[in-house]
Image (cartoon, rainbow, N blue to C red):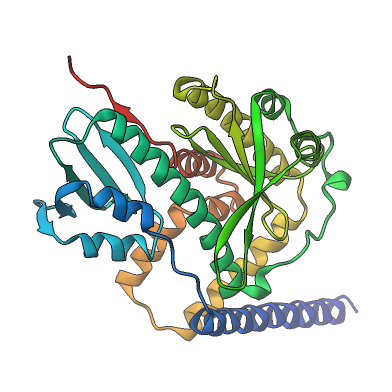
Amino acid sequence: MADNITSITGAIDKKRKEDIALAAEQGANEALNNAMNADLIPLQTLQLSRVLALSGDVYFSQYGSPELVSNEQLLHAASQQLYKFKYNDETNTFLMSFDGEYNYTLMMNDAFTPEQGMEALKMLEGERRTNGVIVQENGRRMLPGNVRENKYAPKEFLPAPLKTDALAMALKFVESVSQPKIDDLGRVGFDEINVEQAVSELLTRAQYELFNISTDINSGYINLTMSDDVGTHFAINMKESVDPGLMSKVTDVLMDEITVNHAAYREHNPEMNEIRMRMQAAAESMKEMFPPDPEMDAYMREVLDNDPEYQQIYGNDERADELISIQNSENVTSISPRRR
């Protein structure tokens, strides 16, 4: 009798694993088809082109010596991908960095001043804010089936509300709040909303919903994205009294609170174990679909090592928190002090 029960249990378990693997394979194929056929919105480069109009030579480097390139090469790269940037007024140069490996250096004209550098940073931050919305929209177009509601209600599995002290502190300095809107032509606009209502909504939702931020220090914006099924975005414009130094401190405090909340959410969310099983099934399916490739395996290990969601799911909280901190601080630009 016991042997029969074991046999039946084994068969059920085998069928369950096969169903999971099939669903993973079908999901991968659907995602690939959606990505290939998606009508994507190009990233904006108008503000970057204006900065380039005030520059001289443009150099590109990846590991080796810099080489002189055209403005069009940088503009093409910026139309495809978000990038980090900073201005060094000591050398009067801009550094544009893609993936931390592909770097462009703009040698600004001799007449270009630190004041113009600050204005250029604000313009580029605004363009990056818009492009962040476009990237999010393109992601939805490529993976429309990826939108889903949380299986378990956070109010049911969290033992206590998430921390909101740092968020409440930051929201005391709000000047205005806006939300992005994309029209049928792919143009992005930001509609201003009522500050009091926005603050109340954020503080209420943040008790049981996760969010992430990036900050535009020079233009005084906190870009906050909720982790709901549509990634609700708030562009929070801080008061003029919040200078770059204070913005850096606000960012650090918020990031600490975000890290704590993400850890608590992962620890108590029962869906995490189910996601692990699906990822394992997908990995097994991919192994069967593609022959071993040492170079690709090494590449995927590197990609996964830098994926905070992957690290979270497999319980590597310290690495996940490190990556989240890096990602949320990547949008923080700085100006090197000018020598006197």
Question: Which image quarter holds the N terminus?
Answer: bottom right
Determine whether, in the image, residue 116 is placed left or right of residue 23: left
- Image location (x, y in percent) of residue 161: 82, 34
Determine whether, in the image, residue 35 is placed left or right of residue 54: right
User: In which quadrant of the rendered view does residue 120 lie?
Assistant: top left
Q: Is residue 139 above or below residue 256?
A: below
Q: Is residue 125 above or below residue 3?
A: above
**In front: 201, or 293?**
201
Q: Residue at x 22, y 22 (%)?
A: 338
Q: Residue at x 59, y 35 (%)?
A: 237
**In front: 118, or 149?**
118
- Image location (x, y in percent) of residue 58: 16, 52
Question: Which image quarter holds the C terminus?
Answer: top left
Q: Residue at x 87, y 75 (%)?
A: 2
- Image location (x, y in percent) of residue 76: 30, 66
User: In which quadrant of the rendered view does residue 7 lie?
Assistant: bottom right
- Image location (x, y in percent) of residue 138: 54, 68
Farthest-out residue, front: 111
